[in-house]
Amino acid sequence: MAIRTDESDGAMREWCETCKRETPHDVSIRLRTESKRPKNAEYSREPYRVSACQICGTERTLRMNDA
């Protein structure tokens, strides 16, 4: 996964499989609950890197503890 910042507009640019080129992306970190059981849900949150293409809207997630 190639990531770079465009010096002209400061946008994060990454490869988009849908667009088949480098495009600007919105990037964030989100906590996601992995347990299906409500009793343990508060202990099963994991950080995910979420990258969304600003051109086509395709979203890609990566579990940070697996990176």
Image (cartoon, helix red, strand yellow):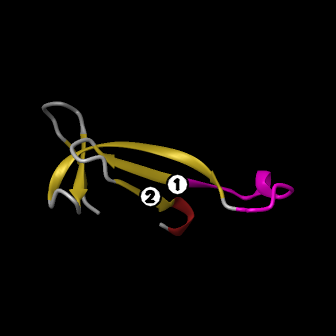
Q: Is residue 46 magenta?
A: yes
Q: Residue at x 23, y 33 (%)?
A: 10
Residue furthest top as drawn: 9
Q: Quadrant of residue 5?
A: top left
- Label 1 neighbourhood size at 10 Å, few (<14), some (14-19), many (20+)? some
Residue identified by numbered label 2: 61
Q: Helix or strand or loop: what does disc 1 sit on?
A: strand
Reply above or below: 49 against 7.
Answer: below
Q: CA distance from mark 1 to mark 2?
A: 6 Å
Cβ atoms at labels 1 and 2 below 8 Å apart: yes
Q: Which amino acid type is marked by label 2?
A: Thr
Along the line of sight, the residue nearer the viewer: 15 or 67 = 15
Question: What segment carries the magenta color?
Answer: 35-47
Q: With 7 as the anchor, is 43 left or right in this view?
A: right
Specify the label residue 57 is tagged with.
none
Q: Amino acid at mark 1?
A: Tyr
Location of the N terminus by quadrant is bottom left
In the rendered view, does 51 fall on the left or right side of 12?
A: right
Q: Is disc 2 surrounded by few (<14), some (14 to 19) or many (20+) residues within 10 Å?
A: some
Circle 1 sits on which residue? 48
Q: Earlier in the sequence, mark 1 or mark 2?
A: 1
Is 4 located above or below residue 17 in the figure? Answer: above
Q: Give left or right: position of 29 versus 38.
A: left
Instruction: Return the x and y of residue 41 as percentages of the image width and height.
Output: 77, 55
- Looking at the image, is 42 positioned above or below residue 37? above
Which residue sits furthest right? 39
Q: Residue 23: image x %, image y %? A: 19, 48
Q: How many marks?
A: 2
Horizontal and vertical percent for residue 38? Answer: 82, 55
Question: Dot 2 lies on which element?
Answer: strand
